[in-house]
Amino acid sequence: MGDASSAAVAGTLRRTAESGGAATILCHVRPDADTIGSGLALGLALDRLGVDVEIAFPGPETLPAALGALPGAKLLVDAPSVRGSDLVISVDAASVERLGVLGSHFDAAATSVVIDHHASNKGFGDLNFIDPQADCTAVLVLRILDDLGVDLDSDIATCLYAGLTTDTGSFRWARPDSYRIAARLIDAGVDSRTWSRRLFDTHPFAWLGMVAGVLASAQLDAAACDGEGLVYAVVDRAALSGMSWEESESVIDIVRTAAEAEVAAVFKEVDADSWTVSLRSKKTVDLVPVARAHGGGGHRNASGYSDTGSADEVIARLRESL
């Protein structure tokens, strides 16, 4: 296993296309716009080059409605229907565990490729194109497509834009290069107004009540993080009743706005005493070591992990590690 450049990955994809081969593209559990957008953009490009493409993500969660409307969604197959290929590509997954039950297809591939931007990713493929300085995996896919000489049409650009805009918080924490890339994608035909509304500003009415209840119970610990502050909220199973999992993902972006806290955390109960924890920091706190200490990972200012126990137990463990 070793590091690879975008050109090296493009070369592998080109040889697959020239031989009339197949490729399996795997997205991570609880798929977000970066993993799905990256997978669909790459899949559309390979499909046009004559590669037999299948794209999948592990369950049990279903695909958020907005992501199901992205171009290329026809290439998605259910996890149990994945056949696997000699070439298997992981997009936006920091570890093989993030591929869930589909990890077996990755391990069985003749050639496995990792495309990712998470700092916690140590490389688990034959070719590892990993750049923690990239704002999202979608921009890494764009580099590969440029090396392949694929035309950037509106469909591919829209998929890439979905990953770019969401992983930069609608460009609130984007690096300068991401603005240049966004302009290029919009020039290629992305309807940015429509997709910003779909990805950020569309929720079922019941979401308003869920958020109201969760925010009312939010807690502030001004002494945490060496006095820089921690704000946190709990989304238990009752709050999520009748709500799709992706609706709980937006809560962290509201909680993190508390001016008195450098770090924000949202604890989401996905099953009885089973939690996913989303972490965000504003500037000074590196969250990667915190998430790794709990078996997770991510980025300096946005990480996460899973834990088990009561809400009080899970909260206490995080506070001890901060």
Image (cartoon, rainbow, N blue to C red):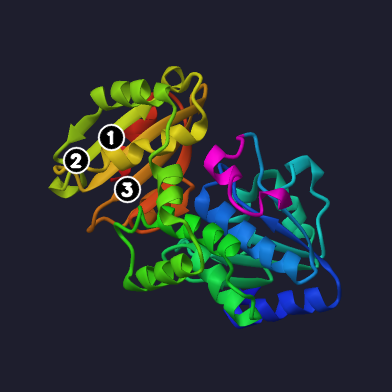
Q: Secondary structure at mark 3?
A: strand
Of the residues shown, which amino acid type is indicated by label 2?
A: Ala
Of the residues shown, which amino acid type is indicated by label 3?
A: Arg
Tell me the CA gap for discs 2 and 3: 12 Å
Q: Earlier in the sequence, mark 2 or mark 3?
A: 2
Position in image of residue 129 (x %, y %): 57, 72
Write down the residue under mark 3: 280
Tell me the CA gap for discs 1 and 3: 10 Å
Q: Secondary structure at mark 2?
A: loop
Q: Secondary structure at mark 1?
A: strand
Query: 269 and 65: which one is in front?
Result: 65
Q: Is residue 244 left or right of residue 53?
A: left
Q: Is residue 313 left or right of residue 308?
A: left
Position in image of residue 264 (x %, y %): 28, 42
Task: Determine which quarter of the picture holds residue 25.
Answer: bottom right
Q: Is residue 232 above or below residue 281?
A: above
- Residue at 48% across / 39% down in the picture? 306
Task: Determine which quarter of the picture holds residue 206.
Answer: top left
Q: Is residue 66 magenta?
A: yes
Of the residues shown, which amino acid type is indicated by label 1?
A: Tyr
Write down the residue under mark 2: 258
Label 2 neighbour load within 10 Å: few <14, some 14-19, many 20+ = some
Magenta stretch, residue numbers = 61-75
- Residue at 51% across / 69% down in the picture? 188
- Residue at 83% across / 51% down in the picture? 83
